[in-house]
Amino acid sequence: VKIGTVTRYGVVTQDGKGEAVQGLVLGLAGANAQQVVEGVRKKLDELQPTLPQGVQLDVFYDRASLVTKAVGAVSAALLEATVLVIVLLGLFLGNIRAAVTVALVLPLAALITFILMRGFGMSANLMSLGGLAIAIGMLLDAAVVVVENIVQRLATDPTAGKLPRLHTVYRAVREVAVPVTSGILIIITVFLPLLTLQDLEGKFFVPVALTIVFALAGSLLLSLTVIPVLASYLLREVKHEDPWLPRKLLALYEPALAWGMRRQGVVVGVAVAMLVGAGVVYTQVGKTFMPTMDEGDLIVGIEKLPSVSLEQSAALDLKIHQALMKAIPEVTGIVARAGSDEIGLDPMGLNQTDTYLQLKPRDEWRMKSKEALLDEIRKVLDPMPGISYSFTQPIEMRVSEMIIGVRGDLAVKIFGPDLDKLNAYA
């Protein structure tokens, strides 16, 4: 037994200064990404003092930051939607207490949704919270009908003053319970087919469908139980009259309805024409599996000559780093990996490099769009001989690999027995 050397099949370079060692943390299937990253960071803080002098651990890509950003964006959208809903309810119901009573469904239904998500082992991610954002308008359907009928009963029922308030509220809820339940169940039924999706489609859309179903079921339960009780306390002195905004809208709608009833053929013809037009427009709309999400960072895939050596590949990568960081101040750091890692987890040739660009926050850019930034990068890379390049993002690249096996939206594979002809065609 003797100490020898292992052939290197890859190299990592950083910031145009030289080589570095890259480590990759893999979370177990089903693990919470936020908790994994927090645990890893704590462990890195413990390891740093034990390292030799001059050795430093730096995190250059943290998926948890993207998760936090995405969840924060969806949470902000939910908050904004809640405020808008309360304002609209106040305008259309004409009773701020009734509006607040209805709006209480939103946080309570969200709480029920999160409890059910936890029970089913779901995490609060972009897809599940997106489902909650989609459902936020539908969550109030049942509560609006219930509260409106309670308000009407309390204001107009001749027995309202003689019977206990809870009895009047109970009668009002009982009147609308069946249609309200039927309406919510119909909406839930629409989303049930999404639960049958499998593979990658299921991973994306099942959490959305489940979240919507949980939220709607919770809102129905609240509308028939909690909301009536709250209404009995909050809606004390009620005067039922049409608010100003509905009165104005009805004044515009009634003449239009009368005109349509007199000209039913015209209305049906316009509806059919709109249906046909919608079908034609649908065939012209572009289609994609998933919209491109701005992840905040960028990967430049570099392709060099197949005959390049490891040393030459590393030297060219460093040259690219230096040129990019000198010309583009939006780039704060670069980590590039050429070739394969030691366990063959992500095999590439020595002529292939994944160049990870760390970028400043968007509000600190000189340019207004990401496409303008890509144009600046092209100006730096185009004059360099012997390379071709493409742009992608960390998660986008992995999703493309899962779907079609390559790191891009389009792949062309050429097969044949003659290697020279294949190279020429390629």
Image (tube, rainbow, N blue to C red):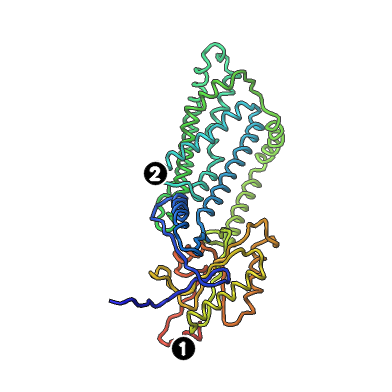
Tell which residue pokes out farthest to the left in this image: 1
In the rendered image, the quadrant that contains the N terminus is: bottom left
User: Quick check: can you spot residue 354?
Assistant: no
Q: Are marks 1 and 2 in contact (CB under 8 Å)?
A: no
Give the mark nearer the N terminus: 1 vs 2. 2
Tell which residue pokes out farthest to the top in this image: 162
Residue plotted at (57% across, 57% down): 279
Q: Which residue is mark 2?
A: 120
Q: Position of residue 19 (x, y in %)?
A: 51, 72
Residue plotted at (51% across, 14% down): 164
User: Quick check: can you spot residue 304?
Assistant: yes
Q: Which residue is mark 1?
A: 420
Q: Is residue 286 above or below residue 190?
A: below
Packing grade of label 2 (10 A; few <14, some 14-19, many >=20) is few
Q: Is residue 55 above or below residue 166?
A: below
Q: Position of residue 358 (x, y in %)?
A: 58, 63
Determine whether, in the image, residue 296 is placed left or right of residue 369: left
Tell which residue pokes out farthest to the front in this image: 53
Nearest the viewer among 297 and 254 is: 297
State the image quarter where residue 238 is shown. top right
- The secondary structure type at the circle numbered 1 is helix
Q: Position of residue 407 (x, y in %)?
A: 49, 69
Packing grade of label 1 (10 A; few <14, some 14-19, many >=20) is few
Residue plotted at (43% across, 43% down): 117
